[in-house]
Image: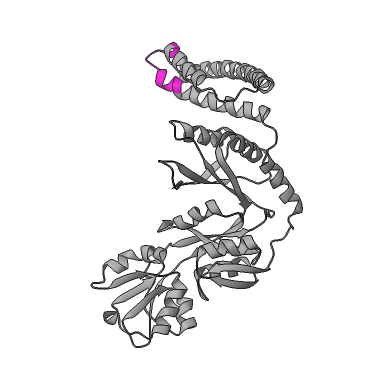
């Protein structure tokens, strides 16, 4: 047979498959209605296991692995379809719709904003990129930034969440668990580190270098080349620069930003000492209340799943079934538990998308400790 004839045969077979799939989904709809009337949960692990075994046997040894994969997708779609029928609109979806109606159409340019560190910190640079006229309040640690926002002392807070070289800022994710907030915007800042010293100091004079842990990780290639130099963590890169200035020491240096050189009257030794020239830090802007501004196309969640085989896969399958792009998946251990984790997820989808609302409904009803963290846009 010619390939054109074979393709025509494929087309006829596909038409039959689509007809049978639609018939199956009609039956799934009836099952969802029955489950609703009789208060039966959507997921039935025993039924699903028997189904996979049965279709694999029907397929035979030649294609049973492929058939199992096919039916894994089909059952995911079936569960998603049942969820759209059974679940009423969750309180979270109602909250999002209310925020869309009540949030001003323009992101504010003036606000009181909480930042960690001191003047010259990268969080200040992120803040000034988001707001034209911010009134910045500085705090010693990230815990206090969350507290300032939650208490109403500051309308917004700026927090680093990940770096393209050093990865996730784990402490921020851990603090998310214990604080009430909503992400309203995010921004990426190019992070270029310099080594700052007091006037007249040479690199050979330096015996100790101080900076934030993330900055040190981002510059560890440079630091490994130095011999006999102590590395010490401190609260912030700007705090490190200020500490060097205030100490007057000739053997102390700070990994910090170029603006901090002028701000604190320090000299620059090596410039751009980070491992990678393409070094970006992503910051989130948080508020106490849910605010969703026009153009929001990123959404973040937090959830946990049972510590059982397939639990996380069943959550991930919902994204595929609804055609939503998952851009980040981060896990953090739950304190006091045995190998149980909280998962943090970022997705790309317009906040107006019906598929996003359906996903949120399914996650709200079908996962443990589900929490919506906000819908927002990102500046670069």
- Horizontally, residue 301 falls left or right of residue 209, namely right
| Of 151 and 54, the residue lying toward us | 151
Q: Quadrant of the C terminus?
A: bottom right
Whether residue 277 is situated above or below residue 1 in the rendered picture: below
Farthest residue, direction bottom:
200
x and y percentages locating residue 292 in the rendered image:
68, 53
Q: Residue at x 55, y 36 (%)?
A: 367
* Dominant secondary structure, magenta: helix
Q: Going by the picture, which residue comes out furthest to the front?
A: 336
Residue 73 location in percent, x, y?
51, 27
Q: Is residue 160 magenta?
A: no
Residue 295: x and y in percent read 66, 53
Q: Indicate whether 295 appears above or below 40.
A: below
Residue 243 shown left or right of residue 376 in the figure: left
Q: Look at the image and give the residue range highlighted in magenta.
A: 58-68
In this picture the colour scheme is one colour
Question: Where is residue 230, by image quadrant?
Answer: bottom left
Q: Is residue 67 magenta?
A: yes
Look at the image and tell me in which quarter the N terminus lies: top left
**How many marks overall?**
0
- Report x, y in % for residue 25: 62, 20
* Residue 186 location, quadrant: bottom right
Residue at (44%, 71%) from the top-left corner? Answer: 237
190 or 109, which lies in front? 109
Q: Is 244 positioned to the left or the right of 230 in the image?
A: right
Q: Is residue 1 visible?
A: no
The residue drawn where x is 34% and y is 79% is: 252
Q: Residue furthest left?
A: 227
């Amino acid at each position: 047979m010619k390939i054109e004839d074979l393709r025509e045969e494929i087309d006829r077979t596909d038409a039959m498959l689509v007809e049978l799939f639609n018939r199956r989904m009609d039956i799934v709809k009836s099952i969802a209605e029955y489950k609703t009337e009789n208060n039966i949960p959507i997921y039935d692990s025993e039924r699903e296991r028997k189904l996979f075994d049965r279709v694999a046997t029907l397929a035979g040894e030649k294609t049973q692995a492929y058939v199992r994969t096919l039916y894994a997708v089909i059952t995911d779609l079936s569960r998603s379809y049942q969820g759209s029928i059974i679940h009423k609109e969750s309180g979270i979806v109602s909250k999002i719709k209310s925020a869309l109606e009540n949030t001003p159409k323009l992101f504010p340019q003036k606000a009181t904003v909480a930042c960690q560190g001191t003047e010259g910190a990268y969080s200040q640079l992120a803040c000034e990129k988001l707001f034209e006229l911010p009134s910045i309040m500085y705090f010693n640690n990230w815990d206090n930034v969350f507290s300032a926002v939650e208490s109403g002392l500051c309308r917004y807070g700026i927090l680093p969440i990940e770096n393209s070289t050093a990865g996730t800022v784990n402490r921020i994710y851990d603090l998310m668990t214990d604080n009430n907030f909503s992400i309203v915007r995010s921004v990426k800042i190019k992070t270029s580190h310099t080594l700052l010293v007091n006037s007249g100091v040479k690199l050979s004079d330096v015996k100790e270098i101080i900076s934030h842990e993330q900055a040190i990780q981002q510059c560890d290639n440079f630091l490994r080349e130095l011999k006999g130099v102590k590395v010490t963590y401190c609260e912030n890169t700007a705090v490190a620069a200020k500490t060097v200035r205030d100490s007057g020491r000739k053997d102390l240096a700070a990994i910090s930003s170029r603006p901090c050189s002028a701000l604190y009257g320090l000299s620059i030794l090596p410039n751009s000492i980070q491992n990678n020239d393409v070094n970006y830090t992503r910051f989130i802007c948080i508020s106490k209340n849910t605010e969703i501004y026009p153009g929001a196309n990123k959404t973040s969640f937090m959830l946990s799943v049972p510590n059982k085989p397939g639990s996380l896969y069943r959550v991930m399958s919902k994204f595929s079934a609804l055609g939503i792009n998952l851009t980040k998946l981060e896990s953090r251990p739950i304190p006091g538990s045995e190998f149980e984790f909280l998962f943090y997820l970022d997705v790309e989808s317009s906040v107006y998308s019906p598929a996003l609302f359906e996903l949120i409904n399914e996650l709200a009803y079908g996962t443990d400790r589900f929490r919506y963290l906000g819908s927002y846009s990102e500046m670069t």
